[in-house]
């Protein structure tokens, strides 16, 4: 399969802290991928590495088979909207469209104007005076005018109200559906992206916890409820992701590699959110306990 | 890129030019009045006469008196000159320091550096255009101030070579301004916030300028020494247009007897109590006035060296800034 973004044991360090470590993942072409993880998990770092703003300290990252850091030509294929959608606040939307044309060889100004007109964004008002939702739309229109093959969006909806969130994601989906653009968008809330994405990457504590197509992830995970479990092998279960116990009963979230036939267990389907939360809860809280000098 | 640079900085350029125009509107009339006074006192001719070695004593006296009157009236303008010296660093603080740091502070570097042109090209075009604009500005400033302080130069003993006026005219302001802007840009790539970058620029500029002015400039060329007899008729010989680094009175064996001083007694004259000239200072017969100086005709050589140092520093800082830009995310 065609891989748009591929990383191999990718790592980035700030001082002595690893913001991202041992990150190996592959994003197939044509996917709408959600990059989910709590704040500080390394999402922005991964996106910055992919767009060439950062240089890897370890491992490698490839976008369309090229290393993005310092690769100016490769930038033409990547659309990037940074966190908080930074734009020159004293520029009007119309001026930003002109600026984009001066900064890019491939630039569809008509497309950008068309989009902005449809969204009812005033062309002659400084973008600093627009609402957060409108500004995000301007940033998206500018990124799409590059006609990128890969679109990277860093927390595009974090600062928007629920209505603006939905509108933003709708207009995003509408425009990438036809072009077949691969999209990778990050959020610390899965709920924001659950409806639009068909591929998922979960980051936590600088490491990749889970990656795969949404359908596969949902179909291969199950919740099992049964008698208190002591760690023995259950037929059809590849791994226990998360377990919670009461005195007599255990609830397990498991990855399966076949049907679970043991009648002792009640098998339930899980939602994507259940899966993600199970993997996130697996994160490391040990270090901060020792750093605070208290018992875990 | 050129369009973007212009669009981003046109307002600032407008206000800079407005400020310069206001300054010119204030200083040009003063300069014209000053030149009129200078001419009315006959000092234009004097300046030429005094430059010659064999100037008649009577001419020298009238001319000195004329310069004295001119000085009484316009000496306070030297304070204005001190203010003018701050202009290059202002350009560095307001044009140089925000160039990168403001982009990073507002996050717009992530927008502009991920467009098709890439950040190397961004840095080169931006630094180049701002540098060229600043160069033009500094040239106008240097020429304008050269014209303006010309009469003050002529009235001052050290002429245009003096400590502060040297920094104001000729080509040196070009070097200073380019350096200030480059320092600002570099500081912005290191501290990445506008206010700290501006503060560092100010402090760094003052530090480097002071160091060069006090430690390096007197040694661009080996200084010369000159001696004058402590006995002589008429007003004492004063060198004009030279930059005096040190002076004093020395005994024949070379020991410094009175630093920073000069004396002159009439030939064969006796001091109070019938003592020899300067005996109360411990001077022995054959003592002489001594000065260490840089001759006035080295002005352009020194201007060239000073400008060269600061242009070289500016280029180095810009190179480092371009390298640092590659590492900002």
Image (cartoon, helix red, strand yellow):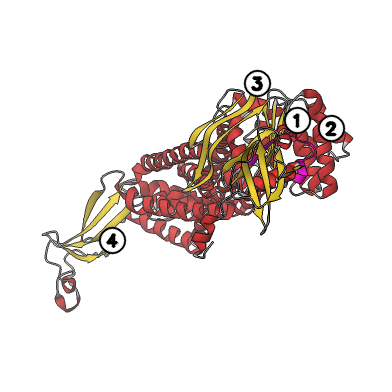
Q: Nearer the viewer, residue A105 or B141?
A: A105
Give the magenta-colored segment's residue range.
Answer: A191-202
> Residue B34 at what x, y percent from top left?
55, 54
Callout 2: 10 Å neighbours few (<14), some, many (20+)?
Answer: many
Q: Nearer the viewer, mark 2 or mark 4?
A: 2
Tell me the chain of label 2.
A
Q: Which residue is mark 2?
A: A115
Q: CA distance from mark 1 to mark 2?
A: 10 Å
Q: Which residue is mark 3?
A: A2
The answer to the question of whether label 1 and label 2 lie on touching residues, with beta carbons closer than 8 A, is yes
The answer to the question of whether label 4 and label 3 lie on touching residues, with beta carbons closer than 8 A, is no
Q: CA distance from mark 2 to mark 4?
A: 89 Å
Q: Which residue is mark 1?
A: A144
Q: Which residue is mark 4?
A: B234
Q: CA distance from mark 1 to mark 4?
A: 87 Å
Q: CA distance from mark 1 to mark 3?
A: 22 Å
Q: Nearer the viewer, mark 3 or mark 2?
A: 3
Callout 1: 10 Å neighbours few (<14), some, many (20+)?
Answer: many
Is residue A142 within the magenta segment?
A: no
The answer to the question of whether label 2 and label 4 lie on touching residues, with beta carbons closer than 8 A, is no
Q: Earlier in the sequence, mark 1 or mark 2?
A: 2
> Residue A23 at what x, y percent from top left?
55, 37
| Quadrant position of the N terminus of chain B in the picture | top right
Same subunit under labels 1 and 4?
A: no
Tell me the chain of label 4.
B
Tell me the chain of label 3.
A
Same subunit under labels 1 and 2?
A: yes
* Element under disc 3: loop
Res B209 seen here = yes
Question: Looking at the image, which residue sits at the far front?
Answer: A263
* Element under disc 4: loop
């Amino acid at each position: 399969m065609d891989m748009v973004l591929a990383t191999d044991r990718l790592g980035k360090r700030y001082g002595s802290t690893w913001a991202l470590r041992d990150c190996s993942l592959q994003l197939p072409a044509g996917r709408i991928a959600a990059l989910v993880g709590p704040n500080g998990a390394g999402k922005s770092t991964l996106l910055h590495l992919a767009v060439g703003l950062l240089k890897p300290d370890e491992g490698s990252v490839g976008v369309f088979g090229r290393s993005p850091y310092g690769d100016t030509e490769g930038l033409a294929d990547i659309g990037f909207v940074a966190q908080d959608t930074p734009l020159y606040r004293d520029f009007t939307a119309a001026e930003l469209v002109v600026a984009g044309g001066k900064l890019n060889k491939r630039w569809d100004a008509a497309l950008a104007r068309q989009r902005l007109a449809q969204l009812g964004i005033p062309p002659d008002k400084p973008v600093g005076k627009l609402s957060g939702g409108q500004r995000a739309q301007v940033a998206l229109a500018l990124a799409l005018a590059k006609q990128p093959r890969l679109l990277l969006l860093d927390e595009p909806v974090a600062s928007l109200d629920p209505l603006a969130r939905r509108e933003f994601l709708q207009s995003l989906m509408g425009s990438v559906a036809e072009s077949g653009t691969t999209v990778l968008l990050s959020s610390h809330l899965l709920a924001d992206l659950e409806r639009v994405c068909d591929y998922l990457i979960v980051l936590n504590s600088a490491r990749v916890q889970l990656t795969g197509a949404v359908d596969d992830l949902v179909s291969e995970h199950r919740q099992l409820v049964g008698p208190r479990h002591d760690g023995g092998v259950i037929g059809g279960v590849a791994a226990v992701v998360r377990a919670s116990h009461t005195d007599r009963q255990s609830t397990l979230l498991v990855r399966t590699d076949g049907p679970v036939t043991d009648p002792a267990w009640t098998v339930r389907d899980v939602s994507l959110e259940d899966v993600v939360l199970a993997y996130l809860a697996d994160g490391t809280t040990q270090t901060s306990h020792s750093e605070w000098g208290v018992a875990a | 890129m050129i369009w973007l640079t212009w669009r981003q900085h046109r307002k600032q350029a407008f206000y800079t030019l407005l400020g310069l125009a206001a300054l010119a509107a204030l200083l040009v009339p003063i300069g014209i009045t000053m030149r009129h006074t200078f001419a009315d006192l006959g000092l234009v001719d004097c300046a030429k006469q005094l430059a010659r070695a064999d100037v008649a004593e009577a001419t020298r006296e009238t001319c000195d008196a004329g310069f004295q009157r001119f000085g009484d009236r316009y000496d306070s303008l030297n304070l204005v000159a001190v203010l003018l010296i701050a202009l290059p660093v202002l350009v560095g603080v307001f044009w140089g320091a925000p160039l990168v740091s403001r982009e990073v502070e507002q996050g717009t570097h992530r927008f502009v550096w991920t467009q098709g042109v890439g950040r190397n090209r961004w840095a080169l075009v931006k630094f180049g255009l701002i540098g060229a604009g600043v160069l033009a500005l500094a040239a106008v400033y240097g020429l304008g101030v050269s014209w303006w302080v010309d009469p003050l130069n002529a009235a001052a003993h050290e002429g245009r070579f003096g400590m502060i006026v040297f920094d104001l005219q000729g080509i040196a302001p070009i070097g200073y301004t380019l350096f200030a802007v480059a320092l600002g840009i570099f500081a912005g790539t290191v501290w990445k916030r506008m206010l700290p970058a501006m503060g560092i620029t100010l402090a760094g500029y003052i530090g480097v300028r002071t160091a060069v002015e006090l430690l390096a400039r007197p040694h661009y060329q080996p200084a010369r020494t000159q001696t004058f007899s402590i006995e002589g008729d008429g007003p004492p010989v004063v060198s004009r247009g030279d930059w005096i680094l040190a002076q004093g009175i020395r005994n024949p064996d070379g020991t410094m007897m009175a630093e920073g001083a000069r004396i002159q007694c009439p030939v064969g004259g006796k001091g109070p109590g019938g003592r020899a000239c300067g005996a109360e200072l411990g001077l022995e017969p054959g003592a002489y006035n001594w000065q260490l100086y840089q001759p006035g005709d080295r002005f352009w050589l020194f201007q060239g060296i000073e400008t060269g140092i600061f242009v070289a520093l500016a280029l180095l800082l810009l190179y480092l800034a371009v390298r640092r830009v590659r590492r900002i995310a």
